[in-house]
Image: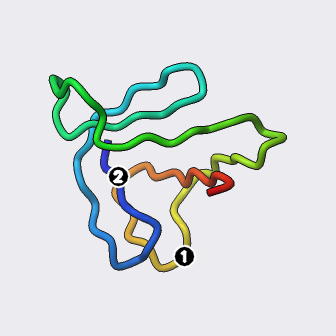
Amino acid sequence: MFKTGPRSSDGYKWRWFTLDDRKLMYLEDPLDPYPKGEVFLGYHADGFAVKKGVPPGMKEQGFGFTLRTKR
């Protein structure tokens, strides 16, 4: 998938993703031994949400979604 940061000026980068219980990890290369970053999803009651589409001002790259967490 393509991933971008929280700012509208952040560019999209190709990343590989894995989901381990409540942790979404992303890697630069599928054979990397360690993730480049991770996002703890928590539970719906903890304030995480997934919405179809990208926020206003962000460039759409095909099918987009927005992941919001407490942090």
Q: Where is residue 18 in the image (x, y as percent from the top left)?
A: 39, 26
Three-letter amino acid code of the residue under disc 2: Lys
Which quadrant does the N terminus fall into?
top left
Q: In this view, does 63 lie to the left or right of 52?
A: left
Question: Residue pushed farthest front?
Answer: 34
Name the residue tied to disc 1.
56
Residue 28 picture quarter: top left
Q: Position of residue 35 (x, y in %)?
A: 30, 34
Question: Residue pushed farthest right?
Answer: 45
Q: Residues within 10 Å of mark 2 (few under 14, many from 20)?
A: some
Q: Residues within 10 Å of mark 1 (few under 14, many from 20)?
A: few
Three-letter amino acid code of the residue under disc 1: Pro
Q: Where is residue 30 in the image (x, y as percent from the top left)?
A: 19, 27
Residue 36 picture quarter: top left
Q: Position of residue 71 (x, y in %)?
A: 62, 57
User: Could you tell me which residue is drawn at 69 percent across and 47 percent down?
Assistant: 49
The residue closer to the viewer here, 22 or 57, is 22
Question: How many badges with numbers are in the image?
Answer: 2
* Colour scheme in use: rainbow
User: Could you tell me which residue is drawn at 43 percent across and 40 percent down?
Assistant: 38
Q: Which of marks 2 and 1 is nearer the N terminus?
A: 2
Question: Residue pushed farthest top?
Answer: 21
Up the image or down, 59 lies above or below 41; here it is below
Secondary structure found at label 2:
strand
The residue closer to the viewer here, 56 or 16, is 16
Q: In this view, does 13 lie to the left or right of 47?
A: left
Residue 46 picture quarter: top right
User: Could you tell me which residue is drawn at 57 percent across and 20 percent down?
Assistant: 21
Disc nearest the viewer among 2 and 1: 2
Name the residue tied to disc 2.
3
